[in-house]
Image (tube, helix red, strand yellow):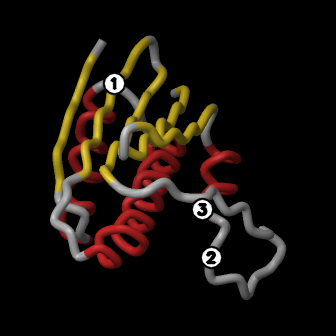
Amino acid sequence: MSYLELQINPNLDETELSIKLVEMFSENQGFLGKSLFQIKVCIAEIMNNIIEHTALANNESTYVTLKCSLVRQVLFVKVEHKAPAFEIKRGNMDNVEATSGRGWLIMESWLDQVTYEHRDGINTIVLVKSC
């Protein structure tokens, strides 16, 4: 099993850097192509929501923990962030004018599994994608 753990501030610069590090980690383990693109977009979606709905709203300097592991050609990405619980919104993919609500649907359609849990003040999202 290969493992990567990052603690980043929820901002665009550190999000971009963390996605690049996940990309390098994944490529080094042979996780390439469309699957890697999809996981990177999903991480960006989660981070954008953390920045938009939590970090900017609370003006807090709380960090995000990003944990990646690759086990038997399956990539697991766990994103943890101290924040209030949130409601998963599933918008309408057919509404081309919608400005929100599609991220979770995209993640569910691209990934093998995506889960959300809020416990003890921590939001945890786990992404699972096979190579």
Q: Secondary structure at mark 2?
A: loop
128 shown above or below 63: above
Name the amino acid type tagged 1. Ser
As drawn, the label of residue 99 is none
Cα separation, mark 1 vs mark 2, equals 30 Å
Name the spot of residue 99 as percent of width and height, x first: 63, 83
Residue position marked by numbered label 2 in the rendering: 100
Residue position marked by numbered label 1 in the rendering: 69
The answer to whether marks 3 and 1 mark residues whose Cβ atoms lie closer than 8 Å is no
Name the amino acid type tagged 3. Gly
> Few, some or many C-alpha atoms within 10 Å of disc 1 (few <14, some 14-19, many ≥20)?
many
Which residue shows up at 46% across the image and 18% down it?
A: 73
66 shown above or below 49: above
Name the spot of residue 30 as percent of width and height, x first: 36, 26
Lateral position of residue 107 relative to residue 44, left or right:
right
Q: Residue furthest front?
A: 120
Quarter of the figure with residue 23: top left
Which residue shows up at 32% across the image and 32% down it?
A: 68
The answer to whether marks 3 and 2 mark residues whose Cβ atoms lie closer than 8 Å is yes
> Few, some or many C-alpha atoms within 10 Å of disc 3 (few <14, some 14-19, many ≥20)?
many
Closer to the camera in the image, 54 or 33 = 54
Name the amino acid type tagged 2. Ser
Residue position marked by numbered label 3 in the rendering: 103
